[in-house]
Structure formats: C-alpha cells, structure tokens
Image (spheres, rainbow, N blue to C red):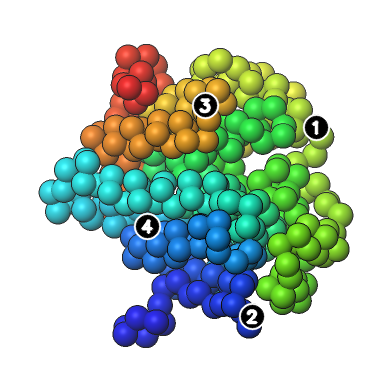
Amino acid sequence: VSSGGEADVLFEEQKGGRNILITLNRPKALNALDASMVAKLTPQYKEWLPITGPKRVIVMKGAGGKAFCAGGDIKAIYDAKMEGKSPKECCGFFNNEYELNQIIGNLPSHLVQVAILNGITMGGGVGLSVHGLFRVATDNTMFAMPETAIGFFCDVGGSYFLPRLPHPALGTYLALTGARLKGPEVAIAGVATHYVPSSNLESLEKDLLAAKIDQVPEILGRYSTPLEEGQLTKDRLNAIERCFRHDTVEEIIAALEKDDEKEWAAQTLKLISRMSPKSLKVVHRQMKEGAEKSFTDCFAMEAVMAERFMERPDFFEGVRALLVDKDKSPKWSPPSLAEVSDDEISAFFK
C-alpha cells in the first residue's frame, strides 16, 4: 500500500495463496485508469504468467459501487500536450495501456479472469475486462465506447472485439454513436458473458475466490439470471443492422434518415451529429480493418492510430470541451464529414 493512504489498485491474495481479488480503487474518479494504476497492474500480471505458477482465478472489480472503470485518464494526456510534450510522448500512456490489455487477452490457461462490471464501464475499463474470459454485467452496468465524442477512436482493442460481437453491425453502431447499453443489454450484446443481479455479487465474489479454475463456468452459470431485453430487442438489432452495415458513414446517415424506426433513428442521428467527423470516418474504417486482423495486429494498428490522433487537434479539442472548459461545444476540424478526405483517413492506417 502506498504511503499516500490507500493504493489506487488493491491486490488481495486469498487464503491458500491462489486466487486474487483486484480492486480498481479510485472511486472518486470512477476508478478511471491512469498511468500509476497501469504501472501496478502490468508487472503483477507478468508475475503470474509463467506456466509453472499456481492456477488462479483473478476477480477484478471497481471500488465504490458506482463504476467498474469509467475509462482512461484522458485529462492527463491533454495536460501533457499543454506542457509541450510531443505526440510520441503523449502516446506513452496508450502504449502501456495496450500492453496490459494484450496481456489480459492472452492469459495462459492456468489464469482465469472474471471482471465484475458493476456500474459504469467505458473505454479503458472495457480494455481491462472484455478481452478476459468472463465478464459479469449487473443491473447497475452501463457500457459505452464514447470515444468519437472526444475526437478519438475506439481503442483498447475495440478494433478486435467490436466487429466480433454476435450481432451484425452492432459493433459499428456502438463505436460510431457511443450509445450506452444498460444492465442485461450488455450481455445480449455479447460484451458481457453473464448477467447477475447486483444483490448477489457479494456471495458470487466469495464463491469465485474460493473456487478452482475449472469450477468458474459452473459458478457463473448458477448465479446468472435470464435476460430482459431492454432496448436491445430483435427489432432494434435488425434496425441497427439495416442502418449500420453500409460501406460509408454517409450511407449510414442516409439509411437512418429513411428508416422506419423513426424515433430511434432520429435519436441516433442526433448522437452522430455531435461527434468528430474525422473520428467517425476513422472509426468506421477501423471496424472494417479490425474485422480482418488478429488480436495482436489490431493493437499494432491502434498504436499507430493513437499517435495520429495525438498529432491532430480533434482529441485535444474534445477533451477541452468535455473536461476542461466543460462547454460541451467542441469545434471539430474539419467541421463536416464532406471535408474529411479519404487521404486524410488513410494516414491513420499507415
């Protein structure tokens, strides 16, 4: 434990020295992932990796009940830029974060991770959980990949997991709109593997931390309850596929403008209209590229993309409008989709 009070990540080894409870412990910041937390998590996971080590169940949760992890600490990257750091230096955090995401996605078979997504789970929090074997949503879960709203892209492996969600074009919809999924919808979408009412989390956690790794699926199955579809009905999933399967952002917008699910389409157009035009086009292409790439290649692509965003103004303008001046009216560059050239998009993928 650090001298400055409670540590920002807690590791509790269970009796018998096998299983581990990891608590992301910055509840006042909704457990947003920062450089200090990544610097604690990565070496700890590396220590568990050797195949000669004990079989472990790793349970990861967020402190405070409001959030699992509300994203990466983007304000720190904004501050680095304002202090005159170069785009490459600004990318230091992303590169370290992506390394951790990949370790979690490639855990050897003697390590089984269960992430308890109780509360807000966005961006960087998705990167810590979605690549692990098991993800538990609860009635409090709120999932989003809201990066287009800050002039960024769906990183932390979004290139890999979003195009592979079980419903066609759902990943593209979530990526472009930053739409929020709540509770059971998170499991219907395939982001979570299980759904457990939050009232049962305490006993679930206790059972998981006492379990052998091969007992985990059975325990999760026992605690899971049937899914109520919420907003993600069959009809809604069909509408998402109808509108978001298209080859360009402009065609997606045209499809929404004439779709029969008028109210949903109007809300969705409103969401899209607030986003960075450049981010929309980059993310749309990212989903197509990611669908064809391996897990590792997706992260290599994202490392390049992150650096391109650090070289351009939209991300910093997005963070300014949301977190610095809080005026929520970013001035995107360029301001319209029509002005974003194909060459400019291709630059993100070189």
* Residue 235's disc number: 1
Q: Amino acid at mark 4?
A: Asp
Mark closest to the chain's N terminus, 2 or 3: 2
The residue tagged 4 is: 73
State the image coordinates of residue 310 (x, y, percent, origin top left). Answer: 27, 39
Contact between labelled residues 2 and 1, with CB atoms less than 8 Å apart:
no
Mark closest to the chain's N terminus, 3 or 4: 4
Q: Amino acid at mark 2?
A: Gly
Circle 4 residues within 10 Å: few <14, some 14–19, many ≥20: some
Please tell me whether mark 2 sits on a helix, a strand or a loop. loop
Mark closest to the chain's N terminus, 2 or 4: 2
Compared across the picture, whether 94 is left or right of 58 comes to left
Q: Is residue 311 above or below residue 12?
A: above
> In this orientation, which residue lies closer to the viewer: 237 or 93?
93
Distance between mark 2 and mark 3 Cα atoms: 40 Å
The residue tagged 2 is: 16
Mark closest to the chain's N terminus, 1 or 2: 2
State the image coordinates of residue 219 (x, y, percent, origin top left). Answer: 80, 64
The residue tagged 3 is: 293
Circle 1 residues within 10 Å: few <14, some 14–19, many ≥20: few
